[in-house]
Image: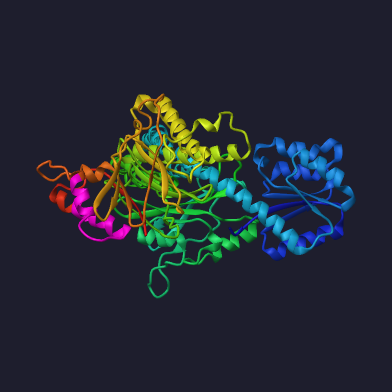
Amino acid sequence: MEIAYANLLTVDPHKTRIQFLTDTIKEQGWYSITTCSDNQTARFLIASKLFDAILIDVNIASEDDFLFLTRVRSNPRYSQTPIIVLAKTDEYNLVTTCLEHGATDYICMPTNETLLKTRLSTHLQQREIRAQALSCLNAFNDMKKLADDLQEVILPLGIALSAEKSFDSLLERIVLEAKAICNADAGILYLRSDNELNFNIFRINSLDVAYGGSSDRDIPFAPLPLFNQTGEPNHQNIATYVALEGQSVNIPDIYNAETFDLSAIKAFDEKYQYRTISCLTVPLKNKDIIGVLQLTNAKTPEDEHIIPFSIYHKLVAESLASQAAVVIHNHVLGERQKELLQAEKELQIGRKVQADFLPVNILQPPGWDIDVYFEPSRIVAGDFYDVFHMPCNKVGLIIADVCDKGIGAAIAMAQVRSLLRAFIQQHYFLANQNMLSSDLAEYALPHDDVTSFQPVDLAAILDAVTLTNVHVGHNHGESSVFVTVFIASLDPESGEFIYINCGHPPVLVLNEEGVKARLDPTGSAVGLMPLARFHIKSGKLEKGDTLLAYTDGVSEARNLDGELFGESRIIESATERPFSASNLLHHIVNQAHNHMHLAGQYDDITMLAVKRK
């Protein structure tokens, strides 16, 4: 991961060392470096400005009973900020105490440029990864937030705007509300006038800059031409492109974007010591495009770390932009709000969450052919699959089906998939640390045919299923959410596998002669009964054998007469010709679609094939 920008604070009384640090960091391309030489100034800077990393002399850090470190770590904005102590070799005792008081790392001075750059880059990358992980976690709450904002902010805002008499106040409120909902540092609203785009409202929180609206300060920026001197559309500027094309543009990092001419933005940044990173630009459109709303530098609520604008931000900004267009043209915003409500039920957030949870590249152990087929009946699905590495050279296999469809099922899918993986990883970790309280000897198969698995392997998937069932059953039982799951652990060397079938359609083991075995349910669906018991069974895939798992969207595919495709047709399709895993799945799906024909697909279709070559 490449760090494109960082705001660094260096606290050191040694001028020579300060110069070395500054010169080295500037070579790396960091944007901003602030230096000072004493504790008091450093604490003042920390209180007035947000830094991404701090380099501090060990003696300053230890002054006044480590007051600087204590103050910084007590500030929520700096709870995850890297603090690197600079020390000489004879100051290790102070370094140890600094680490105990909240320092992240230390660098022994003097040091070389490579080590300094590597340490800084590593800590900043780790901070960025933590911020991204937190952003992903927040994505699960976006759907509810969108619905709440529709009811509590956007709809009431439309009513308030229609009663607002001041035109400038109308537009200013649109910008302020958009900035607040998207947690953006800056907002600009442009209005179209003939062939120009005029600045109307301009706000930047971090610079305390306000032009237009209630500020009574005139906009100091010249209008943007929509066409060049030869009459061609001005697609070089982001705002004019959006005004001309009517399409939103979401740029995660302005300084890494190559599509547009960003010289004006960079000139503004240099003049005002600002840094524009993420940028979302949406059109003000009813029937015609009358202007543009532009937001920059979305921030995380926890530590104000700058992040890209999400799909949720785009939907909200587009809604508010439509509000502005409706107010200017004195129209009702009913259709746009219906579109957003539909999007809240079915579209962007669920699709993004689901895409992040399904593996892109299917694991292929030597001597094996593994493939999946996934076809949602809607934009998002309740089915899911997983193929992943497990400890002890095992391969995890999961196929599952949530009892619902659409966005609710997609969220339940993401939760169950995460719980299963997390509990499996937790179990192996605790086992490696000798922290399991139960006796693993109680986990054993009913016979000794399977020799490739230890009690810890059995306990891992059994405990994962059991704990996931308890969580779903207790927390979502009232909403009647349950999931059929087939989970297995495969040993690629021997072909042996252990599995639990939680109310899922029987999984088939096929060979050249047909069906070799049916892996029937060994427990109820996950979430159906919180205190349910599950049983592990085992099997073995010989060379040429194929394990075929599918969801009921395949077996229950119906034609216009209501006739099911059924397990018998699945078996018939599977045994019609020699196949690879991919050919097998596509052939079965084609047969199922031919069966449905004009009736169309009603349920999600998901299949998993594991063939031993």
Which residue does the image show at 80% across and 45% down from the upper left?
41
Q: Nearer the viewer, residue 121 or 188?
A: 121
In this view, 62 is above or below 546 = above
Which residue does the image show at 77% across and 42% down from the upper left?
99
In this view, 43 is above or below 280 = above
Considering the image in quadrants, where does the C terminus appear? bottom left
Q: Nearer the viewer, residue 197 or 412?
A: 412
Considering the image in quadrants, where does the N terminus appear? bottom right
In this view, 238 is above or below 202 = below
Q: Residue furthest right?
A: 90
Residue 335 included in the magenta stretch of the image:
no
Residue 293 in the image: x percent, y percent?
Answer: 44, 51
Residue 541 in the image: x percent, y percent?
Answer: 37, 50
Picture quadrant where residue 2 is located? bottom right
Q: Nearer the viewer, residue 111 or 579?
A: 579
Which residue does the image show at 44% across and 39% down from the upper left?
448
Picture quadrant where residue 380 is located? top left
Q: Residue furthest front?
A: 448
Residue 584 included in the magenta stretch of the image:
yes
* Magenta-highlighted residues: 568-592
Number of numbered discs on residues: 0
Q: Residue furthest bottom?
A: 230
- Judged left or right of residue 60, residue 553 is left
Q: Main secondary structure of the magenta part?
A: helix
Q: Is any part of residue 334 visible from this angle?
A: yes
